[in-house]
Amino acid sequence: MGMTYTPYTNAGGCKSESTVDSDIATIANKGFTHLRVYSTDCSTLEYVGAAAEKYGLKLILGVYISSTGVSGAQDQVTAITEWGQWSLVTLIVVGNEAIQDGYASAAELASFISSCKSTFSAAGYTGQITTTEPIDIWQEYGTSNLCSVVDVLGANIHPFFNAETTAAEAGTFAQSEVTLLKKICSGLDVINLETGWPSAGNANGAAVPGTTEQTTAIKGIRESVGELSVFFSYANDLWKDPGEYDVEQYWGCIDQF
């Protein structure tokens, strides 16, 4: 079971090394085994890596593809390679909804994943590599572009964004998505790289945010797909834009564990 972590302050600056250490101690004490990070900025590799080693956590690293596209992400590949503490790393996720966000085409992303694989492998990495997208992107581009270049199918499964799913149905919804995803890339396991429920904001149809609802939803997700899930997120992300339903800042869920 994993937890996502971003080393940013509420104002969007970088957290200090001591704060990162304290945060990760908390995550470890809650029984998590894996920590997912998204990028290499804010000394993520150094600070999070040191704390993960100290508290016995494994890392799921990220190469974040932004509006600068795959070429703009190359510096992160270099940073990870130079850091190279592979014994801490079980998975590298190249792109986080990069196709969904329009930052890369499926063909560009597939090519970049292959390039990253070669680079990391040459530097001594023997673990798995994937990307992560919502199910509709996998259904559209999995067979044609992505299945052949990933070692495991990574998906972000967010029941809240299905307007017909209540908090009580979140676990069932997540399980049904995993079942569908398993049919896309023959022979590949599925990992749910982002999942959770917001504690505040506006309703999306039957999906209502709130603290009680978050408790209900996360309990259901844990029971149905907890062992293959990374929960989103450690703390509220007040540095983010509020988003469509004013929920984007309120996914912090460490207190639910």
Image (cartoon, rainbow, N blue to C red):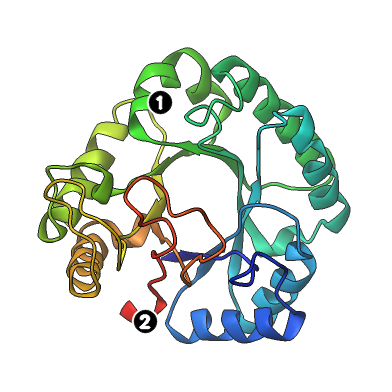
How far separated are the C-alphas under marks 2 and 1? 32 Å
Circle 1: element type: helix
Q: Which residue is mark 2?
A: 255
Amino acid marked by disc 1: Ile
Q: In the current view of this chain or complex, which residue is farthest to the top?
A: 144
Horizontal arrangement in the rendering, residue 233 relative to residue 52 (left or right) = left
- To which quarter of the image does residue 41 belong? bottom right
Instruction: Determine whether 162 is above or below 108 in the image.
Output: below
Horizontal arrangement in the rendering, residue 231 relative to residue 4 (left or right) = left
Circle 2: element type: helix
**Which residue occupies the foreground of this view, 236 or 109?**
236
Residue 137, label in figure: 1
Instruction: Determine whether 235 is above or below 169 in the image.
Output: below
The spot of residue 24 in percent (x, y) is 59, 79
Of the numbered discs 2 and 1, the one sitting upstream in the chain is 1
Instruction: Determine whether 190 is above or below 33 in the image.
Output: above
Residue depicted at x 42% and y 52%: 194
Image quarter (top left, top right, bottom left or bottom right) of the N terminus: bottom left
The spot of residue 23 in percent (x, y) is 58, 81
Image quarter (top left, top right, bottom left or bottom right) of the C terminus: bottom left
The spot of residue 150 in percent (x, y) is 55, 32
Does residue 257 appear in the picture of this structure?
Answer: no
Residue depicted at x 48% and y 71%: 234
The local crowd at label 1, few if under 14, some if 14 to 19, many if 20 or more residues have their Cα within 10 Å, is: some
Residue 65, label in figure: none
Instruction: Determine whether 37 is above or below 81 in the image.
Output: below
**Which residue occupies the foreground of this view, 227 or 171?**
171
Q: In the current view of this chain or complex, which residue is farthest to the right?
A: 82
The local crowd at label 2, few if under 14, some if 14 to 19, many if 20 or more residues have their Cα within 10 Å, is: few
The spot of residue 71 in percent (x, y) is 78, 28
Amino acid marked by disc 2: Asp
